[in-house]
């Protein structure tokens, strides 16, 4: 088992875990399967979460007008020139990827797995959009390929979840994560650091709370204000609701968060990058790998390590 106790890293890197499991590099291929969201179609709400604009994380090849097979082929073609040997995971990313009947879901996932270069699936969804039937299917599927279910937690504070129009509370996320992990399925989670009205203490309390959950991996990213969202309008009208961190402030916040985090939870991401044409703020001018280098350097200077204060 790969962990921070038997290597020189200061945090548990999820990419290294994948590489150790498969013996070579693993690349996710984003898939847009044309799903919607219960927070958009009226079953839970309208308008979606206040921060959400799905254009911010959909690659150009990732269009719902294309078949699953075509998106995979174009994604693999895009990445194959960078790395000669690697495995691929079909990453169902846009909107809520369990929000349909099991028969339709099964057909979508199986189409992706029909590609001989695809060794598994990663399914992004909401904690209020899974049930026993779907989770039992994922449990069976995980016996023959790699399966991870990623849940958007975003915050562990119910006041924040209500304010951002999330449509579920934190207890819902806890229940879904426990139900998934109890079936032997890998579980990922997303958190946004810096949501409106959240203090530094509130943000760090997220690390404490999620550390008790059976998570495989965690994605963190800074709050980004994106054009075309309700939150962008809120920022224009009430900038005092927001704390937009500088790059260095966020680095220190992330390191404090990591020190509180259960060392068994792998870190998959620390920041996110919205397309420049959509991003309002903050604009740090840093690529992901440049940011990670700065975090690792600062962790070394501070002698920080994941779980140091867990």
Image: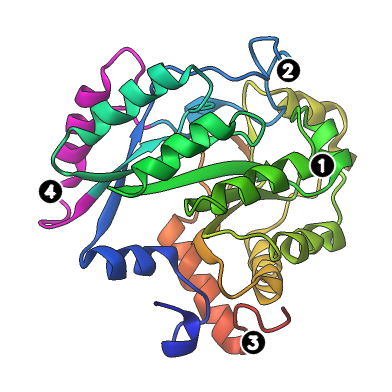
Mark 3 and mark 2: span between their CA atoms? 44 Å
Mark in front: 3 vs 2: 2
Q: Residue at x 46, y 82 (%)?
A: 9
Q: Which residue is mark 3?
A: 302
Q: Earlier in the sequence, mark 3 or mark 1?
A: 1
Q: Identify residue for label 2.
A: 44
- When asked about the image quadrant of residue 228, the answer is top right
Mark 4 or 3, nearer chain start = 4
Foreground: 106 or 270? 106
Q: CA distance from mark 1 to mark 4?
A: 41 Å
Label 4 crowd (10 A; few <14 / some 14-19 / many >=20): few
Q: Is residue 278 visible?
A: no
Marks 1 and 2, how far apart in space?
22 Å
Relative to 159, say whether 166 is above or below: above
Circle 1 sits on which residue? 196
Colour scheme employed for the rendering of this structure: rainbow
Q: CA distance from mark 4 to mark 3?
A: 38 Å
């Amino acid at each position: 088992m790969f962990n921070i106790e038997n290597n020189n890293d200061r945090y548990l890197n999820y990419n290294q875990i994948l590489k150790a499991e498969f013996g070579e590099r693993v690349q996710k291929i984003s898939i847009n399967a044309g799903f919607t969201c219960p927070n958009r179609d009226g079953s839970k709400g309208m308008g979606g979460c206040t921060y959400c604009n799905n254009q911010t994380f959909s690659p150009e090849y990732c269009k719902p007008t294309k078949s699953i097979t075509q998106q995979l082929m174009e994604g693999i073609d895009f990445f194959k020139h960078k790395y000669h040997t690697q495995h691929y995971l079909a990453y169902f990313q846009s909107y809520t990827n369990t929000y349909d009947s099991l028969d339709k879901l099964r057909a979508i996932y199986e189409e992706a797995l029909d590609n001989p270069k695809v060794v598994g699936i990663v399914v992004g969804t909401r904690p209020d959009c899974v049930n026993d039937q779907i989770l039992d299917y994922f449990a069976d599927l995980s016996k023959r390929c790699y399966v991870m279910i990623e849940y958007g937690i975003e915050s562990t504070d119910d006041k924040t979840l209500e304010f951002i129009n999330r449509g579920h509370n934190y207890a819902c996320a806890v229940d879904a994560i426990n139900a998934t992990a109890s079936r032997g399925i890998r579980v990922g989670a997303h958190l946004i650091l810096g949501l409106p009205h959240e203090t530094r203490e509130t943000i760090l309390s997220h690390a404490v709370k999620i550390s008790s959950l059976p998570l495989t991996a965690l994605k963190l990213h800074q709050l980004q204000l994106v054009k075309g969202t309700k939150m962008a309008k809120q920022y224009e009208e009430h900038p005092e609701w927001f704390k937009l961190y500088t790059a260095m402030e966020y680095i220190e916040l992330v390191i404090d968060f990591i020190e509180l985090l259960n060392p068994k939870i792998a870190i998959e991401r620390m920041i996110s990058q919205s397309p420049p044409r959509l991003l309002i703020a903050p604009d740090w001018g840093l690529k992901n790998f440049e940011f990670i280098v700065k975090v690792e350097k600062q962790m070394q200077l501070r002698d920080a390590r994941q779980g140091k204060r867990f």
